[in-house]
Amino acid sequence: MRKICIINQKGGVGKTTTTVNLAIGLARKKRRVLILDLDAQGNVSICLGKKGEKTMYDLLVNKVPMEECIVNIEKNVDAIASDGKLAEAETILMGRPNRERILSRVMENVEEDEYDFIILDCPPSMGLMSQNALLFADEALIPSSTEALSFVGLQKILEVIDETNTLFDHDLVVAGILPTMYDRRNKICVQILGQMENEYNGMTLDPIRINSKLIEAPGHSKTIFDYARSSRGAVDYRKLVEFVLKND
Ligand SMILES: Nc1ncnc2c1ncn2[C@@H]1O[C@H](COP(=O)(O)OP(=O)(O)OP(=O)(O)O)[C@@H](O)[C@H]1O
Ligand SMILES: [Mg+2]
């Protein structure tokens, strides 16, 4: 079972888009996938059009058994959704002992062979939810849009991962930096992608190109594979799925 967190403290860089399309892409390759939404914006369930009665809040705060919080999305895909209530969880859980490992503890009963992948969608902040994700996951995938401010933020998230590993004696591996919203006609995008490839050589993956179909798909509660299967977005996310499976 591989646990991959999709993380970047910068907002709007494509974390949720990547979570949803990677997860469904893996499931269509016959892998069993569990999606965990750790963001109070609850965008995963908006993208997938399904949300159970119990959410991540109940799992973390009320210790409701995981099985009760899971909603089936489609064959081979389950999810634990979130909503605005999760924002309260940060405050409540702040006072709990070993607060950075609450997610790891509540997920302890998941059998190793129950899922092939657990994919975590993180919020755009380095608060308690992201800390819990980092300590639960064994791989991090970092979407980063191809613009100057995102490039600056990359250094920061890599430092946080290093510090977390040292402080908690953890060995989270960076699976890759995923350049997103790449437009080859835009000079800045080309320049930033070049910088990413130079600075993070061997870590930078093939970019996800800018694509309006990726923006439209969540409005139809569809992944890119169902909304526009031949679009650039679908082609690029299929490539990401292949990359993740190559390391399997
Ligand atoms: N490759 C892309 N091309 C065009 N638009 C994209 C692309 N990827 C994501 N988007 C759009 O950009 C917006 C932000 O994407 P998304 O919600 O996935 O980012 P996020 O990092 O999860 O944001 P947040 O930090 O708020 O959780 C959305 O409207 C999404 O549809
Ligand atoms: Mg998001």
Image (cartoon, grey):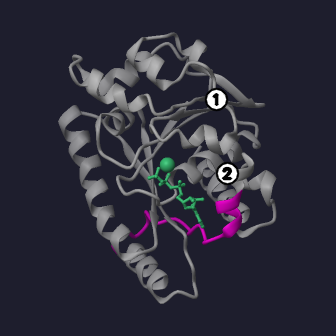
Q: Give yes or no for residue 207 being in the magenta stretch.
A: yes
Q: Which residues are magenta?
A: 199-216
Task: Give the number of callouts.
Answer: 2
Amino acid type of disc 2?
A: Pro
Callout 1: CB less than 8 Å from ligand 2: no
Percent of width and height locating residue 203: 43, 63
**Identity of the residue drawn at 56% across and 68% down:** 206
**Identity of the residue drawn at 59% across and 13% down:** 68
Q: Secondary structure at mark 1?
A: loop
Please identify the dominant SS of the magenta region. Answer: loop
**Identity of the residue drawn at 81% across and 65% down:** 230
Q: Secondary structure at mark 2?
A: helix
What residue does disc 2 label? 218
Above or below, comparing residue 51 to residue 146 in the picture: above
What residue does disc 1 label? 51
Q: Earlier in the sequence, mark 1 or mark 2?
A: 1
Callout 2: CB less than 8 Å from ligand 1: yes
Quadrant of the image for the C terminus?
A: top right
Instruction: Indicate left or right for 67 with 75 as reference.
Output: left
Q: Which of the 4 quarters of the picture holds residue 148?
A: bottom left
Amino acid type of disc 1?
A: Lys
**Identity of the residue drawn at 62% across and 57% down:** 240
- How much space separates mark 1 and mark 2, taking CA atoms? 14 Å
